[in-house]
Amino acid sequence: MFSTESPASVAVGSVGVAFMLVVYILNLFGVLILERWPDNVIYSVSNVIGGALATAAAAMIFYWPTVVFEGAWFLGSVLGTYRILHKYYRGDYRKCPPSATKGDINDTATTDSPFAEEQAHGDALKEGAHVEA
């Protein structure tokens, strides 16, 4: 059937891994913000596609430990995608503004936060107010 040198398995696996790595790197550098719609769906669907392709590639060469690992990755991504879409279509998904960054996703400080004072100080400085330390 297929061998470890099969061009088909290498191509399928490479495309699958590329899907997963590209969205991971985009998330790592802040291009995708997972707390924001639709970035979280893009990330999750890319992991579904990548996991499915990587599972298929591992199955083509009969490497069962990787089939199990990538299959679990695929199933977890499917469940995550379902959860995100279910929350969104139910209407209780918190949408962040398109200009949101990782620093302003939770833009309101709570009094029980250990960083509430620092956040209030930083907010005042952003607005140009003079704050004494």
Image (tube, helix red, strand yellow):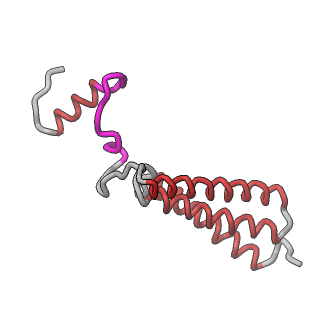
Residue 49 lies, in percent from the top left, at 62, 67
Q: Position of residue 39 (x, y in %)?
A: 44, 59
The residue positioned farthest toward the right in the image shown: 1
- The structure residue drawn at horizontal position 50% and vertical position 58%, both measured from the top left corner, is 85
In this view of the protein, which residue sits in the foreground, 17 or 112? Answer: 112
| Predominant secondary structure, magenta span | loop
Relative image position of residue 93 (x, y in whole percent)? 42, 50
Would you place residue 78 above or below residue 8 in this image? above
Q: Quadrant of residue 120?
A: top left
For the N terminus, which image quadrant?
bottom right
Q: Quadrant of residue 60?
A: bottom right
In the rendered picture of this protein, how many numbered marks are placed on residues? Answer: 0
Q: Is residue 44 left or right of residue 93?
A: right
Q: Which residues are magenta?
A: 102-116
- Position above or below: 4 against 22: below
What residue is shown at x 65% (from left), y 68% (from top)? 16
Task: Classify the position of the C terminus by image quarter.
Answer: top left
Q: Position of residue 32 (x, y in %)?
A: 43, 57
Return the residue nearer the eye: 29 or 77. 77
* 110 part of magenta stretch: yes
Residue at image point 42% right, 49% down: 92
State the residue at coordinates (35%, 44%): 105
